[in-house]
Image (cartoon, grey):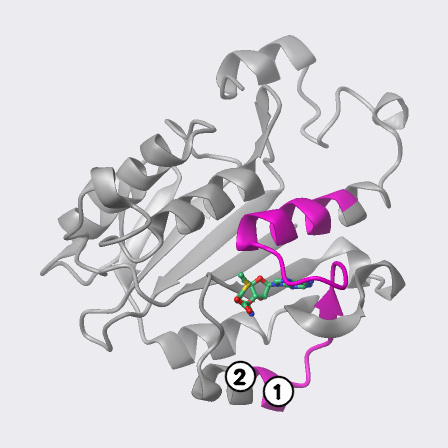
């Protein structure tokens, strides 16, 4: 299983933003949506072995929120960032005053979050890593039993408290290259590095992406791209 946790520092957790200003008043929701879409979509298919958690931490609890998107079950996820932002906004808006976890759309769960607790729990998982510019080359890392749980930040660096939690956790720090990249680009390169470790598509039994389902069925249920 591949998991990504994205720290979203400035998106209003109430969903009080317009889809017409994703890069401005929405606190760089454009990049958050692009990262979610990049993590979960392939050309004409979904990455069903991948889950994404976004922590919306522009406000502390009880306003802070988390959204978990499960690649194996998600629906209505298209490759473009505006419709992905709309799915996430819908979850945030419906979650106002409703802290208990619920599915706002298939495969997309929203709940109140304690960011410190959520980040701490995430990095206790097998295969937890911190994707950061100063890390060791990702190619040198062998995920334990194929488990992968990567933390990365949105266009804003982790806060000192987040960085301290990540440092104290002792998880490996990995870099996808020498330059500071956009979050979505980092996810693309991490997926590519992990994909390169897998057997070629023709060697997988019963269809690729490990679903065991025929290609025609996969494309029928997947996004257009
Ligand atoms: C746009 S960067 C954060 C801001 C950036 N530090 C800057 O100077 O503007 C978004 C996130 O992607 C991840 N990241 C960026 N470049 C990376 C790289 N070369 N290797 C691994 N992770 C990277 C980090 O988690 C980073 O916080």
Secondary structure beneath label 1: helix
Can residue 164 be found in the magenta stretch?
no
Q: Position of residue 46 (x, y in %)?
A: 57, 29
108 relative position to 90: left or right: right
The magenta region covers 166-192
Q: Residue at x 48, y 76 (%)?
A: 158
The residue carrying pointer 2 sits among few (fewer than 14), some (14 to 19) or many (20 or more) residues within 10 Å by Cα, namely few
Q: Are marks 1 and 2 in contact (CB under 8 Å)?
A: yes
| Residue 106 in view (yes/no) | no
| Residue 195 locus on image (x, y percent) | 78, 41
Quadrant of picture, ligand 1: bottom right
Give how far across and how far down residue 188 sits, in percent. 65, 44
The answer to whether residue 113 is above or below residue 202 is: below
Is 183 part of what is drawn in magenta?
yes
Which residue is painted at 48% across and 60% down in the image? 6
Q: According to the image, label 1 marks what residue?
A: 167
Element type where label 2 sits in the image: helix
How far across and how far down the image is residue 210, in percent?
Answer: 72, 32
CA separation in Å, label 1 and label 2: 6 Å
Please report the residue visible at 47 percent of the width from the left and 82 percent of the height from the top.
162
| Image vertical order of residue 32 relative to residue 20, above or below | below
Q: Which residue is mark 2?
A: 163
Q: Using the image, tell me which numbered label, if any, was put on residue 83.
A: none
Q: Write the residue at 74% across / 65% down.
A: 175
Q: Kindly give the residue lying farthest to the left in the view shown.
A: 97
């Amino acid at each position: 299983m591949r998991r990504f946790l994205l720290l979203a520092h400035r998106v209003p957790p109430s969903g009080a933003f317009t889809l017409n200003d994703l890069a401005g008043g929405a606190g760089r929701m454009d990049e958050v949506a692009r990262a979610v879409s990049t993590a979960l979509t392939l050309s004409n298919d979904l990455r069903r072995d991948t889950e994404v958690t976004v922590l919306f931490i522009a406000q502390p609890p009880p306003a802070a929120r988390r959204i978990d998107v499960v690649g194996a079950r998600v629906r209505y996820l298209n490759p473009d960032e505006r419709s992905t932002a709309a799915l996430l906004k819908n979850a945030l808006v419906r979650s106002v005053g409703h802290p208990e976890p619920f599915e706002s759309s298939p495969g997309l769960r929203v709940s109140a979050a304690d960011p410190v607790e959520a980040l701490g729990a995430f990095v206790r998982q097998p295969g937890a890593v911190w994707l950061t510019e100063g890390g060791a080359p990702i190619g040198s890392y062998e995920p334990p039993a194929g488990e992968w749980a990567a933390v990365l930040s949105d266009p804003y660096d982790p806060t000192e408290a987040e960085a301290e939690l990540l440092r104290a956790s002792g998880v490996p720090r990995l870099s996808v290259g020498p330059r500071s990249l956009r979050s979505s680009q980092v996810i693309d390169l991490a997926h590519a590095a992990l994909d390169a470790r897998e057997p070629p598509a023709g060697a997988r039994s019963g269809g690729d992406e490990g679903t065991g389902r025929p290609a025609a069925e996969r494309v029928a249920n997947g996004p257009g791209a």
